[in-house]
Image (spheres, rainbow, N blue to C red):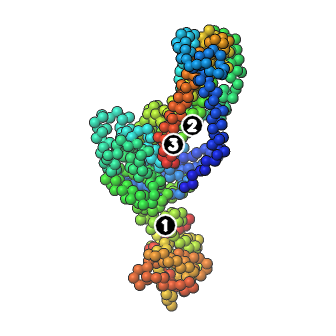
Amino acid sequence: MVNKNIIEFSGVSKQFRERSGETVNALQPSNLGVHEGEFFTLLGPSGCGKTTALRLMAGFIQPTAGEIKIEGKTMNNVPPYRRPVNMVFQDYALFPHLNVFENVAFGLKIKRMHKDEIRQRVYQSLEIVQLSGFETRRPGQLSGGQKQRVALARALVNQPAVLLLDEPLGALDLKLRRAMQLELKALQQQVGITFVYVTHDQEEALTMSDRIAVMSQGQILQVDTPINIYERPTTRFVADFVGETNFLNGKIEHIIPGELVKVMIGSNPVEVRHRSNGVRPGDQVTVAIRPEKLTLMPPVSRSEKLMATVAEVTYLGTDTRYIVEIPGGEKAAVRVQNTGINHAPIFHVGDQVTVSYDLDDAQILTS
Amino acid sequence: MNKPQTSIFGSVYFVLMAIFLYLPIFILILFSFNDSTVLAFPLKGFTLDWYRQLGNARELLISARNSVWVGVLSSILAVALGSLAAIAMTKHHVPARNLFLSLASVPLVMPSIVLGVAMLVFFRKVLGLDLNMWLIAAAHVLISIPSTILIVMARLADFSANLEEAAMDLGANYWVTLIKVTLPISFPALVAAFLTAFTTSFDEYAMTTLITGTDTTLPVYLYSLLRFPRRLPVAVAMGSIIMIVSALLVVLAEWLRRWGTARTPKEERV
C-alpha cells in the first residue's frame, strides 16, 4: 500500500457497563486505518460509536479488546498525556481562568519549552487561526467562533501527529459552520497534519473529508472516499444516511456476468450494471438509486423501461420533486432540475411516465 | 417590558421584616456606646469607654486570639479534607458514595450539644487526653467539614469534565491537571468554603463550652462574662465588633462565589 497508516485499529472493541449491570457494545470489534496526512471523518448518527472511537484514539478510554497503534507504536494503556495526538472538544473546553495566550501556551509550558519559543509558537498558531491581537482576552469574552479558533490553536501549537476533532462545529450557527468547514479543510491542507473528524452531519463529511468511515450501532459499515460513499454505498444504511435514496425491492431474474443484472421490481424488469457482490439469480435484493439520477419522460411505446404514474408533485424552486408509483406498489422519488425548458413542473398528478436512468447509477444492495 | 408593581403591602412587609431582623442588632450596637452598665432605656449618654476597656480586658483578648487561632487552623484543615473528599466524590468512582456523603453530613443535623458530649467522652475517657486548644480545633473541623464538602462539590460539578480531559490531552498528568486546572478554577469556592468554616468555628458555643479546658474561645468567654453585670457592656462592645466583621466576611464570601460563577459563562458548560 502506498498510504502509510498513522492510526491503526486491529480488532478494537469497547464495552461499557451500565448501572443496571448490562453491558453495551459501544464499538464492535473493528479494523481501521487512518492514512498519514488525510482528512478522515467518522460519520454516523448519535450513539453509533464514533465518539467512542475518537476517545479511544485520544486515550480517555481504553479498549476492551484489540490493539490501537499510533505512528506504529502500541497505544494500549498509554495515558492521554503521553500520546502524540491532540483534541478539539465539542464544547471547546477552554480554561476559563486563563487568557487566550495562556490557553494556547498550556501544552508547551508543560513540556517546559523555553519562554521565547513558547511566545513565538503561540503567536504563530494564533496567526494561523486569524486571532492575532486576542492574546489577553478571556474565553468568556469570545464568541463561539472565536473560541473554536482558540481551541484549534491550542491543539495545533503542539504539532501533534494527529488532530482529533469531536463535532467541533456543532455549536455554531449554520452560516458560520459553512464558513468554518471550508476554513478547516484549508487549514488541514496548510499544516499537513492528519485530521480525524467526528460528525453526524453527512453534508459536512462529504464537503471536508478525504475519506469517510460511516458507522452505525458500534460498527464501521464502509470506509471510502466521499464520492464512493455517495455513489457506491455498499449497505442500505449508508445509502439511506448519506443523502436521499430510493430503495426498490425485487428479485434477481438473470445475470450477464460483468454486464448487467436483471431485477424484477413488481412486474417491471429493471437493469443494473453487474458488479461482483456475490448475488445469484433468485436472490431477494434491493435496488438503490438516488432521486436526482432518475429522469422522467412521456410514455414510449416500446419500453423495457420502468413505467410509472405520477403520485405527487412538489415545486422546490431550483428543482421539482416527483413521487411516482410503480405498478406493484413501490414508490420512488425523482428530482428534476428546473432548467431551460423545464422551468416549471411538466408532469402532473395522474400522468403516465417512463422512468429512466443510467445503468451505472443504480446499485444492488443485499443487506 | 412590564416592571413588576411594588405594592404598598409588599413595601410595608419588607420594612417590618427588616426591623424585626436588624433592630436587636442595632440596639446592641447602640448600647455599646451607652454610658451605663445597665442595658436599658433611657440611654444615659455617649461614651467610647467600653471600647477603651476592651484594650485592657486581657482575658477577653486572649480568648479572641484563641478563637481566631482555632478558626484559622480548623478552617484550613476542613477545606483541605473537604476538598479532597469533594474531588473523590465528583471525579472518581467511590463505592458507597451516598452513604459516605450522608455520614459526612451528620454534623449538620446533629445538635451540637450532643456532639459536644460525645467529643468530651471520646477525648477524656476513650483517648484519655487533657482538653486543649488542639482538640477544640479538631472538633471544629468535624462540624465545618459538611459545608466545605458541599461548597467545593457544587463548584466541581459545575465545570465540564472536558476541561480536565483537555489538560491531560495537552500533556498534563493527574497531579499537574489538579494543580493547574481543577484547583485554580475551584479557587473562589475554596475561599468561600474557608470563610464559611471560619464563621462556623468562630460562632460555635454549645459544643465548645463542653470541651473547653483552661483556654477558652471568645463565645465561651463572653457567655461567662454574663455573670459579672458590670463587665457586660464590654462584652456588648466586643459583640458589636464581631458582628460587623462577620457581616463583612459573609459579604466577601458571597462576592467571591459570584465572581467564580461569573468566570464560567453558561454557554461554555453546554
Callout 2 crowding tier (Cα within 10 Å): few <14, some 14–19, many ≥20: some
Give the residue number, with chain letter if any, for mark 1: A243
Instruction: Calculate the distance from the C-alpha at mark 2 to the C-alpha at mark 1.
Output: 45 Å
Task: Give the Cα distance between marks 1 and 3.
Answer: 34 Å
The residue marked by circle 2 belongs to what chain?
B
Q: Amino acid at mark 2?
A: Ala
Please, is residue B105 above or below residue A261 in the view?
Answer: above
Say above or below: B113 vs B255: above
For mark 3, what is the residue?
Answer: B160
Circle 1/circle 3 CB separation < 8 Å: no
Identify which residue, A257 or B232, lies in the foreground.
B232
User: Which residue is labeled 2 in the image?
Assistant: B154
Around disc 1, counting alpha carbons within 10 Å, would you say few (fewer than 14), some (14 to 19), or many (20 or more)? few
* Label at residue A107: none
- Residue positioned 34% across, 56% down in the render: A186
Q: Secondary structure at mark 2?
A: helix
Q: Position of residue A90 (x, y in %)?
A: 47, 49
